[in-house]
Amino acid sequence: MTEIQRRGLLIILSSPSGAGKSTLAKRLMAWDPSLKFSVSATTRKPRPGETDGVEYFFRTKDDFEAMVTAGEMLEHAEVFGNYYGTPKGPVEVAMREGRDTLFDIDWQGGQQIRRSSLGKDVVSIFILPPSIADLEQRLRGRAQDSEEVIAGRMAKSRDEISHWAEYDYVIINRDIDAAEAELKTILEAERARADRQPGLNDFVRGLNKEFEAR
Ligand code: 5GP
């Protein structure tokens, strides 16, 4: 089958911590290895098991600020007292190659990218928990954070959830397999949009040539 040239999508996933966003991002990456995960830079300390350059680029505050000043960030924001930001370079490369990039970023980052010149290529998806009790249980289940950190995350969750209506799609994560299926359906539909496939003109021209040759 002919591969139709496509513009790369910027797929933004946001949710309060504990709503299953990271799990869904990992599942989507496993389903489609051509997706590029946008590795953010952050000033927060690595958690056990996290590797520099894989989950995040772990940077000092000075280094982070230097990246912002140099215009190397597509967006950046302060979350839980730390800085987080999306390096611009890898996103630009992926877009040129027609590859889709997946972002696990908060509403502030989503808003900045949506309002940037890349906004027309954004597909934004918000993941909601089925209940606040469920959200808290999942946060505690991680057993990685202190009581104080958990309380802070719950407060931030309310703020994050208040931005749900800014997103193109909302998935309620009642069941992780169903949520994953919904996410894939969204991606497949967005990829099939006519305006996302600049190669269609050439393809249809080819079809017409075939008509004429009959
Ligand atoms: P965590 O510290 O738990 O990995 O992430 C905390 C929050 O920061 C999550 O909501 C995550 O989506 C968000 N985040 C991660 N990277 C970025 C980024 O580059 N930009 C923005 N705006 N938020 C980010």
Image (cartoon, helix red, strand yellow):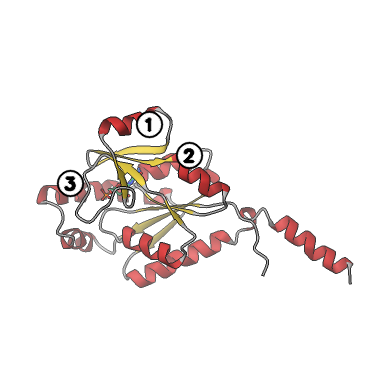
Residue 117 percent across, percent down from the top left: 53, 38
Whether the residues at callouts 1 and 3 have beta carbons within 8 Å, the answer is no
| Residue nearest the observer in this picture, 107 or 205 | 205
Residue 142 percent across, percent down from the top left: 18, 60
Q: Is residue 26 left or right of residue 33?
A: left
Q: Say which quadrant the N terminus sits in.
A: bottom right
Q: Which mark is residue 153?
A: none
**How far apart are the alpha carbons under marks 1 and 2?**
18 Å
Please name the amino acid that badge 3 sits on: Gly
Residue tagged by mark 2?
115
N-terminal of the two: label 2 or label 3?
2
Quadrant in the picture for residue 83: top left
Residue 26 vertical placement versus 164 (above, below):
below
N-terminal of the two: label 1 or label 2?
1
Instruction: Please tell me whether mark 3 sits on a helix, a strand or a loop.
Output: helix
Q: Residue at x 47, y 58 (%)?
A: 35
Instruction: Please tell me whether mark 2 sits on a helix, a strand or a loop.
Output: loop
Residue tagged by mark 1?
68
Please name the amino acid that badge 1 sits on: Val
N-terminal of the two: label 1 or label 3?
1
Q: Is residue 185 left or right of residue 85?
A: right
Quadrant in the picture for residue 79: top left
Whether disc 1's CB lies below 8 Å from ligand 1 is answered no
Whether the residues at callouts 2 and 3 have beta carbons within 8 Å, the answer is no
Q: Which mark is residue 152?
A: 3
Q: Residue at x 49, y 67 (%)?
A: 185
Q: Nearer the viewer, mark 1 or mark 2?
A: 1
Residue 36 percent across, percent down from the top left: 45, 54
Residue 63 vertical placement versus 204 (above, below):
above
